[in-house]
Amino acid sequence: MNSAKTSTDVHLSKLYNWHGKLMSQRSTAMTHIDLARPVRASKITLSQLMHPEHANLLGNVHGGWVMKLVDEAGALACMRHAQRKVVTVAIDSMVFRQPIRIGDLVIINAEVSFTGRTSMEAEVTVLAENPITGEQMHTNTAYLVYVALDDEGRPTSVPPLKVKTEVEKRRMAEAQERQARRLKNK
Ligand SMILES: CC(C)(COP(=O)(O)OP(=O)(O)OC[C@H]1O[C@@H](n2cnc3c(N)ncnc32)[C@H](O)[C@@H]1OP(=O)(O)O)[C@@H](O)C(=O)NCCC(=O)NCCS
């Protein structure tokens, strides 16, 4: 076999080297910010009709049932953001302002409001809808913190949150204050 390099071989090998260098420079230049994900990427809505098995002794919906749905929705929003498994590390106090009735459609909206290194806060709002009239009532808003886990179950870093609108920026600033308070009271 003839091992002498032709000018085409030399040209191609230069081209490959140049392409390889460019790709490695690009990956070095890929900053943490490039990986940021917008709030909309994490948004999720869960809805569920409340049946008699969801009732407490008074015949309204059991608070624990709502808390479970809130935790699920918050976890799903954070999973969408981090594209990782997550665990709940903290749940702020929850206040139920209005009773939810059997026969109501519970609608839970969740989105990521803040990201740390491995932790994320989800803002979760709960609405109860009368499915006949369409009337909706806001029953509570909850804040929960999740930690993303790697394949070995250890905390792993999450993409930063890309906030665009004034509302998103304000929400993130408020969430940052809540997280600072949580860590202070730990
Ligand atoms: C969540 C868990 C993996 C964190 O492990 P850890 O060794 O405490 O990890 P760290 O100290 O590095 O904390 C991880 C993140 O959680 C945050 N965190 C820890 N305790 C917190 C608290 N009380 N409130 C808010 N955030 C908290 C840390 O600030 C850190 O965030 P950052 O990386 O964005 O700065 C571990 O505590 C655990 O497994 N808890 C049980 C989770 C669980 O079973 N949940 C219920 C069922 S889903």
Image: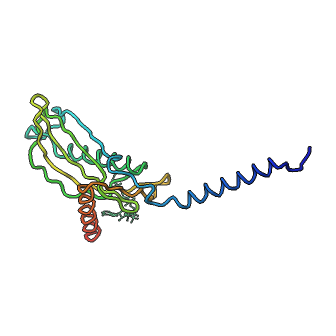
Q: Tell me: residue 21, above or below residue 76.
A: below
Quadrant in which ligand 1 is drawn: bottom left
Would you say residue 155 is visible in this rendering? no
Residue plotted at (38% across, 46% down): 80
Residue occupying the far bottom of the picture: 184
Residue occupying the far front of the picture: 7
Q: Quadrant of residue 27?
A: bottom right
Quadrant of the image containing the C terminus: bottom left
Q: Is residue 157 left or right of residue 26?
A: left
Q: Position of residue 86 (x, y in %)?
A: 38, 51
Residue occupying the far right of the picture: 1
Q: Position of residue 142 (x, y in %)?
A: 21, 53
Q: Tell me: residue 71, above or below residue 185.
A: above
Q: Nearer the viewer, residue 65 or 155?
A: 155
Residue plotted at (24% across, 49% down): 124
Q: Tell me: residue 86, above or below residue 46.
A: below
Would you say residue 8 is visible in this rendering? yes
Residue plotted at (36% across, 62% down): 116
Residue plotted at (61% across, 58% down): 24
